[in-house]
């Protein structure tokens, strides 16, 4: 009698997501080089690319711009629960991919010009638990079912976090280099009169800031969360787990501070150039007067 009333055990299914950042963004043309031919089957929001080994690569474009150039991600299914997401801002996310296969894909991507892995990969665990409501505890996302929508959400959030980490290292380097110039200004009261290096430095800071603003889409919610309040709440918890919003604003503030400091230093360098020119002109006038006086004598 008791045997018939036993409660069925709760089953768990684990999924490991690994995100890897690369040294630069990746264009669609470069990604298309991985397949033998390109076939555009639909002008809506999905592009399908046939694979040599069977199956297909699917890419998703922005809602209002379904062109190849506006691709948001390339999704490559390898098996039932194994797939790869490649984002144009230079991040690949691997779901349940064994290490040796993951490393082979990384080496394949590193075959692109001037592209190399930037830093170690970042892992995140998702567990499916029968009857569970979406929640994050101890760094693990628990769901009743890992739907394709949730797979895309987790992959995108991890890609943003990993890209953010890569940009943070770039900005920290810019910040340190700016600090050296400011320290010289503080100690010596002047900077180099050569303004071209400052122009390049400011351009580098502005380009990095533009990459952050245009590529990461950190304030854009995935389409799937708008119509599902529970998914929306869990997505906010997922963003908070990776601290995306605060890191984004900190990064933007640092970049703005670097740009403002460099513009101030550039103004000082220009003033030194003006002073130098004024002294040079004054010396030329004095020399001309002396030559005219001695010439007459």
Image (spheres, helix red, strand yellow):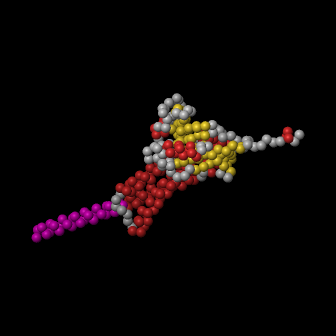
Give the position of the N terminus as an image quadrant.
Answer: top right
Q: Position of residue 104 (x, y in %)?
A: 53, 44
Measuring 47% from the left and 37% from the top, which residue is drawn there? 33
* Residue 112 visible in rendering: yes
Whether residue 159 is visible to the viewer of this picture, yes or no, is no
Q: Say which quarter of the image contains residue 5.
A: top right
Decide whether the magenta segment is chiefly helix, strand or loop: helix
Of all residues, the one furthest to the front in this rendering is 100
> In the image as oriented, which residue stretches furthest toward the right?
1
**Nearer to me, 170 or 278:** 170
Viewer-nearest residue: 284 or 110: 110
Q: Residue furthest left?
A: 297
Specify whether 267 is left or right of 278: right
Q: Horizontal and vertical percent for residue 282?
A: 25, 65
Span highlighted in magenta in the image: 269-297
Q: Nearer the viewer, residue 264 or 203?
A: 203
The quadrant of the rendering that contains the C terminus is bottom left
Residue 253 shown in magenta: no
Q: Nearer the viewer, residue 106 or 290?
A: 106
Instruction: Say whether residue 290 is magenta.
Output: yes
How far from the left and from the top, in percent, is residue 270?
A: 35, 59
Residue 192 occupies quadrant: bottom left
Q: How many marks overall?
A: 0
Residue drawn at x 49%, y 32% is 38
């Amino acid at each position: 009698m008791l045997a018939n009333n036993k409660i069925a055990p709760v089953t768990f299914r684990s999924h490991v997501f690994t995100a890897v950042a690369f040294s630069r963004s990746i264009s669609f043309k470069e990604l298309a080089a991985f397949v033998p031919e390109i076939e555009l089957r639909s002008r809506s929001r999905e592009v399908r690319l046939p694979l040599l080994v069977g199956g297909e690569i699917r890419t998703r474009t922005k809602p209002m711009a379904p062109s190849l150039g506006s691709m948001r991600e390339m999704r490559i299914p390898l098996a039932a629960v194994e797939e790869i997401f490649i984002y144009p801002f230079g991040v690949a996310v691997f779901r349940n991919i064994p290490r040796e296969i993951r490393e082979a894909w990384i080496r394949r991507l590193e075959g692109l010009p001037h592209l190399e892995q930037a830093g170690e990969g970042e892992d995140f665990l998702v567990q499916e638990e029968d009857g569970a409501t979406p929640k994050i505890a101890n760094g693990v996302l628990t769901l009743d079912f890992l739907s394709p929508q949730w797979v895309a959400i987790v992959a995108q959030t991890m890609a943003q976090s990993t890209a953010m980490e890569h940009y943070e290292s770039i900005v920290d380097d810019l910040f340190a280099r700016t600090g050296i110039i400011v320290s010289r200004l503080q100690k010596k009261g002047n900077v180099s009169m050569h303004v071209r290096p400052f122009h390049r430095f400011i351009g580098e800071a502005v380009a990095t800031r533009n990459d952050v603003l245009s590529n990461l889409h950190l304030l854009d919610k995935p389409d799937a969360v708008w119509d599902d309040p529970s998914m929306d709440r869990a997505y906010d918890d997922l963003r908070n787990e990776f601290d995306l919003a605060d890191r984004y604003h900190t990064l933007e503030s640092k970049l703005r501070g670097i740009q403002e400091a460099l513009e101030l230093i550039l103004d000082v360098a220009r003033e030194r150039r003006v002073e130098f020119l004024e002294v040079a002109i004054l010396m030329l006038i004095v020399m001309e007067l002396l030559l005219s006086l001695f010439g007459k004598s």
